[in-house]
Image (tube, grey):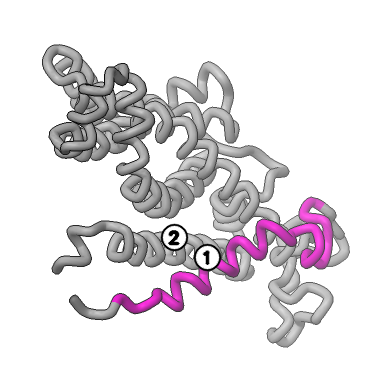
Amino acid sequence: MGRIRLPYFGLFCMALFFFAVIFADVISPYPPNEGDLFNTTLPPAWSEDGGMEHILGTDMLGRDVLSRIIHGSRMSLIISVGCILFYGTLGVTLGLLSGFLGGRTDMIIMRVADLWLSLPGIIVLFMLASVYGPSAKTIIITFGIMGWPNYARIVRGECLSLKERDFVRLARVAGCSNLRIMFSHILPNIVNTIIIISTIEIGGIIVLTASMSFLGLGTQPPSCDWGLMLAEGRQYITYAWWLVTFPGVAIVIAVLGFNLTGDWLREVLDPKQKLR
């Protein structure tokens, strides 16, 4: 077995992301929605007409781009964690029930999961947006409804293997209920898998959240969501390229950080990977 190397770049990207989330109010040069109509679409500091007052420039309303990107990290994390808690909890619970109980319960849950996976998520999002209005809550609800089958399938597979182990048989002999066996004996042995999935899923949710906001189905102005910043800046791209470039770079850094760290966690925490 070879030595597993730390994903230094991935960890650096994640550290940068969480640093922005935690210290946004401290490190932001300006409030994210504070505009200055006398300084609209100023270029970055290193440009000929730029200045150190706005390192990454300003947008069409004179708001500081760097400050909005920093605060946008919070919105991305809030939505991502909300989605993971929503559909992760639902998916893990249904996966445990499906894998442990088997039989008709397993068949019903898996058929519903297959049906859910066949639904076009964008159509569901349009429907919910028309009912609840485009917002962060709508994104969380939509992803929660559409995302649980992935967790359920993976947890079910782990549960099918674990329920044949000796410690589960001993728990049955000791008179433990099915719920206690599932949540006290089997679930702790699946936690590593759940951590790996969740870390990688966060990167995907950040991209999807930005996509939904870009299409006008997610967060609305004046929120400093990265996707919304891309949508607002695209009409100025010919002469204010920084309005779309820097939010795009922020998305890439965050997604790379979570994906690379998730791959590393899979190598560290998954015994099957260690044996390869």
Residue that label 1 marks = 14
Residue 121 % position (x, y): 34, 32
- Classify 52 as above or below 21: below
- Which range is magenta? 4-33
273 in magenta:
no
Q: How many marks?
A: 2
Percent coordinates x, y for residue 89 in the rendering: 42, 31
Q: Residue at x 41, y 35 (%)?
A: 88
Quarter residue 120 falls in: top left
Callout 1 environment at 10 Å: few (<14), some (14 to 19), or many (20+)?
many
Q: For residue 169, which quarter of the picture?
A: top left
Helix, strand or loop status at disc 1: helix
Taking 92 as reference, is 58 left or right? Answer: right
- Is label 2 in a helix, a strand or a loop? helix
Q: Quadrant of the C terminus?
A: bottom left
Identify residue for label 2. 258
Query: Disc 2 marks which amino acid?
Result: Phe
Taking depth in this image into account, of 221 and 15 the one nearest to the observer is 15
Residue 231, image x, y percentages = 56, 50
Determine whether, in the image, residue 218 is placed left or right of residue 112. Answer: right
Relative vertical location of residue 270 with respect to residue 152 in this rendering, above or below: below
Q: Is residue 137 left or right of residue 119?
A: right
- Expressed as whole percent of the image width and height from the top left, the position of residue 239 reads 61, 70
Q: Are marks 2 and 1 in contact (CB under 8 Å)?
A: yes
Q: Residue at x 17, y 37 (%)?
A: 166
Mark 2 Cα shell of 10 Å, populated few (<14), some (14-19), many (≥20): many
- Label 2 and label 1: CA atoms lie apart by 6 Å
Question: Magenta span has 16?
Answer: yes
Q: Is residue 118 visible?
A: yes
**Which quadrant, please, contains the N terminus?**
bottom left
